Amino acid sequence: MSTPFPLSPSALPASAVAPGSGKSRWMKVPIITATFWTIKILSTTVGETFADYLAVNVGLGPLITTGMMLLLLAVALVLQFRTRRYTPWIYWLTVVLVSIVGAQITDFFTDTLGVSLYVSTAVFTVLLIGVFTAWYFQEQTLAITSIDTVRREAFYWAAILTAFALGTAAGDLATEALGLGFLLGSVIFGALIVACGIAVRAGAPAVAAFWVAYVLTRPLGASIGDLLTQDRSYGGMGVGAAITSELFMAVIVVLVAREQVHVQRHGVLTKGQSVAGGRMRDIAWAGAGIVAIVAAAAAVTAVQVAQAPASSAEVVSGTPAKVQGPLGDLSSFSTIVDDVTAKVEAGDLPAARTRVKDLETAWDGAEAGLKPRSPSVWGTMDTAIDGELTALRADHPDQATCLAASQDLQSVIASQ
């Protein structure tokens, strides 16, 4: 039997049959098709964007957000392990949550503990090798199409979680160390995934190629997401996180719903493969989703570009001078900090706390565009901003402490 896609690790096991057979109950993961890779990449971006939205925009903070995501992941994994066959909506919900938690694990090591990306990348690589070694030692296979026991499924999800953490660390390392732009990063990571497929066609081990490609989907999804969401001054298209998330989620819902209906009607075996023309239809649906995203993003960008002259004409003479340095133009952040400082000096700490939320949101939203320009300078600025946030959000904020934090931040910006 031919595989449905170049990066499908092996032929389907006998358990992947129509729902009417008792053996079909243990086929717990999808066949590797174009739809699989499309949903996987899109879910990576949506997962990370949603976590940032909860932590920053909603104001839950990284600790509460991580706790919530861990709880939701535990619930999703219980559902996934309890289901008796591949159920698309449960499977992909679990993948999204694993992508969130995997990224947050890496961010915790990097941003909170200050672990070097070189170290975290090496550590997660060793951990993933360890998972694969234990998996193979116990089961004599790493093929995801053999996920037909509870133990194999446990190894599978452990590998996916570690792969997401590794993909996050390796992607951030490549972006910061090599200074790849969003577009170039998307092209490079996408080309590497395609190269994995070509290697399989040329006779390379399919299982190894699949897992390499799986790790690469994380930095690819992040690069594509940043390309769409980041402001044009940072090298992005300026579509915005909200619109990008809505676009991606809409495509994911459509593709997963099609998967759900198709599996319920025909069983796992026929998904994208056995029905006449199934593979081509699968590619067409995945391609249509990608085209819809590109078209919508291009339309939003065109509208923004058309409105740019009018916006620039509205700039008043009192606009602060641009603060240029290794990170580029920081005048928008300087304006917010000056406003916060003025409110602190006036003794209006509640208003300053409200205004500093704008600084946190803007800074976190610009991280992907600013940090690669100079990670060290970005780290200095980030530490100063954290000091400002901590002072103003204390249980009993002190005016002198808040003013000192604001002035320190102003000095950091001025020194760039």
Image (cartoon, rainbow, N blue to C red):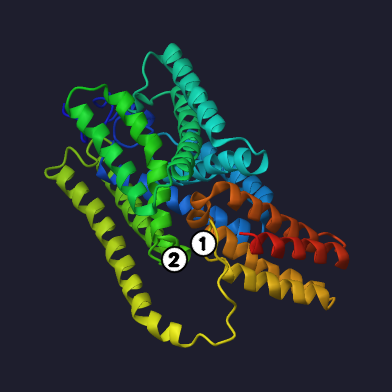
Q: Estimate the x, y position of residue 12 in percent, counting from the top left.
A: 26, 27
Callout 1 amino acid: Gly
User: Comparing marks 2 and 1, which lies closer to the viewer?
Assistant: 1
Measure how far apart labels 2 and 1 are at the Cα level. 9 Å
Whether 345 is drawn above or below 99: the answer is below
Whether 240 is drawn above or below 172: the answer is below
Callout 2 amino acid: Ser
* Along the viewing direction, whichever of 351 and 5 lies nearer the viewer: 351
Q: Quadrant of residue 263?
A: top left
| Mark 2–mark 1 CB contact (< 8 Å) | yes
Whether 401 is drawn above or below 263: the answer is below
Q: Residue 233 bears which disc, if any?
A: 2
Q: Estimate the x, y position of residue 224 in percent, counting from the top left.
A: 37, 53
* Along the viewing direction, whichever of 61 and 405 lies nearer the viewer: 405
* Residue with the mark numbered 1: 328
For marks 2 and 1 on the same chain, the one whose residue lies earlier in the sequence: 2
Disc 2 crowd rating (10 Å Cα; few below 14, some 14-19, many 20+) is few
Q: Residue 19 bears which disc, if any?
A: none
> In the rendered image, which quarter contains the N terminus?
top left
Residue 176 appears left or right of 345: left
Label 2: state its secondary structure. Answer: helix
Residue 411 appears left or right of 345: left
Q: For the point 24% across and 41% down, which residue is it?
A: 271
Q: For the point 43% across and 56% down, which residue is it?
A: 226
Q: Estimate the x, y position of residue 125 in percent, counting from the top left.
A: 48, 26
Residue 37 appears left or right of 117: left
